[in-house]
Amino acid sequence: MDFATPLIPARLIRRYKRFLADVRLDDGREVTAHCANPGSMMGLADEGTKIWLEPNDDPKKKLKYGWRLVDHENGHFTGVDTAVPNRALKAALMAHEVAALDYDLVRPEVKYGENSRIDFLLSGQGPDTYLEVKSVTLSRQYGLAEFPDSVTARGAKHLAELSEMVRAGHRAVMLYLVQRTDCTAMTLASDIDPTYARAFADARAAGVEVMVMDCAISPQGVRPRNPLPFAEG
């Protein structure tokens, strides 16, 4: 998935109210950018951090910049927009680039469960596959990605609903897309949300499959790439 508009560099001044960030552009101007990330963004929102913004000229949007990447200035990037993984994965699924999820029909945002929508419903051969996708951006130990970065009751609910799909005879997959280029494995941040960790264990016991993938990330775009191991806690 390529970004629709070329990204521009900036420096973070502060992130606040979860969805807003004051930033300083290279020309010295200070502007407010939209931050499409409801999580804590632990370790990614320090003052002075180099970031990349996507400008827009949409008259319907109040904010003319969207925060897309953190640049760690060591050759590595983190994608902070939680909407990007679904867009990037949809493109990969449609292009049959994910061997373990190669289906003829890819339908996003299909209603299921209790007032929920599955990220992708995959059909074509065998049982339908219910695919939920989570963006992973936390890393407190070099090389190890963690999820979640804050308490997520919604995430636990999704795991329970995936378990129900398995019991109904379908395939269900929880896919963690690691939006960091500096990680080679992923695990649960059980200390941050023990309830989610218990829901995860229950879902696996029920037959929900767990997949982890990394991404190629640059100011040009984000592309799902290789499977990563899940490290048991």
Image (cartoon, helix red, strand yellow):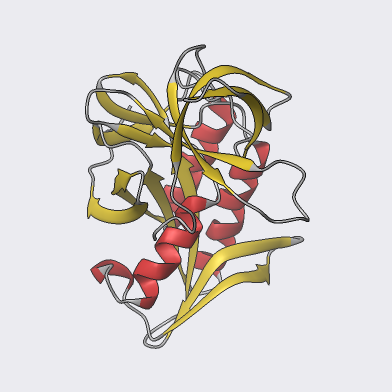
Please report the residue visible at 33 percent of the width from the left and 34 percent of the height from the top. Answer: 77
User: Quarter holding the C terminus?
Assistant: top left
Horizontal side of 158 relative to 127 (left or right) equals: right
Residue at the far front: name it: 27
Q: Picture quarter containing residue 99?
A: bottom left
Is 151 situated above or below 211?
above
Dividing the picture into quadrants, the one containing residue 147 is top left
| Image spot of residue 124 (x, y percent) | 41, 88
Q: Is residue 36 left or right of residue 184?
A: right
Image quadrant holding the N terminus, namely: bottom left
Determine which quarter of the picture holds residue 165.
bottom right
The structure residue drawn at horizontal position 50% and vertical position 32%, both measured from the top left corner, is 148
State whether residue 109 is above or below residue 158: below
The x and y percentages for residue 39 are 59, 30
**Image x and y of residue 91, in percent:** 40, 69
- Figure check: 196 above or below 169: above
For the image, the number of numbered tags is 0
- The image position of residue 45, as x and y in percent, is 52, 19
Left/right of residue 97 with respect to residue 150 in the rendered view = left
> Of residues 164 and 122, which is closer to you in this image?
122
**Image: 155 above or below 152:** below
Q: Residue at x 40, y 47 (%)?
A: 176
Compare residues 97 and 188 and report the one nearer the observer: 97
For the residue pair 74 and 224, the one nearer the viewer reads as: 74
